[in-house]
Amino acid sequence: MPQSLRRWLVIAVVICAAIYQYFFNRGYQSSVPAPTTSAQSVALSAKDQTNAVAKIQQALREQNTEAKFWVTLSGKVIKLLKDDREGSMHQRFLIEIAPNITLLIAHNIDIAKRVPVKQSDTLTLRGEYVWNDKGGVLHWTHHDPKGRTQGGWIDYQGLRYQ
């Protein structure tokens, strides 16, 4: 094989590898911060949990389509869902925060590391609650890369994912 053809072949392989890395492996994932240790973890009091649940119950009872507020609460993972791959990638799972009250958690894994949760695990999280007719969604469970808000987090097994 001529030297110039070999050189072009190597260049083509390097370009293909770069394209694969970018489009299929989400090459920018390496810039996602690693979870931090539990030193930052928040011990959620029963009163704080009760207040958070009451606020969500009120939004559900009133079917308040404009309900949107920051909340810190604990819950038990009841179902793992497929990732949302449209736009920013989101890890999705359902948690139960009180009997018959579930929330969809939409955790942006383009900004924060995936949380290795399993069904029946308990976690504490902070995020923005948004009402929907299925109980609501909690998103912004990660830092704000633009620094506009404090952002949210998920504490799981002694690590904080943000």
Image (cartoon, rainbow, N blue to C red):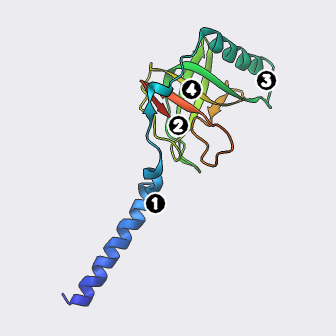
Q: CA distance from mark 4 to mark 2?
A: 10 Å
| Residue depicted at 60% across the width and 9% down the height | 46
Label 3 environment density (alpha carbons within 10 Å; few <14, some 14–19, many ≥20): some
| Residue depicted at 71% across the width and 20% down the height | 56
Does the CB distance between marks 2 and 3 fall below 8 Å?
no
Which secondary structure lies at badge 4?
strand
Left or right: where 23 falls relative to 4: right
Which secondary structure lies at badge 2?
loop
The residue to which callout 4 is attached is: 125
Residue 24 position, x and y percent, is: 42, 57
Residue 143 position, x and y percent, is: 58, 40
In the image, residue 120 above or below residue 151:
above
* Nearer-the-camera pick, 38 or 114: 38
Does the CB distance between marks 4 and 1 fall below 8 Å?
no
Residue 45 position, x and y percent, is: 59, 12
The residue to which callout 2 is attached is: 162
The residue to which callout 1 is attached is: 23
The residue to which callout 3 is attached is: 63
Q: Earlier in the sequence, mark 2 or mark 1?
A: 1
Mark 1 or 3, closer to the camera:
1
Does the CB distance between marks 1 and 3 fall below 8 Å?
no
Q: Earlier in the sequence, mark 2 or mark 3?
A: 3
Q: What's under tag 4, amino acid-wise?
A: Leu
In the image, residue 89 above or below residue 49:
below
Q: CA distance from mark 4 to mark 1?
A: 30 Å
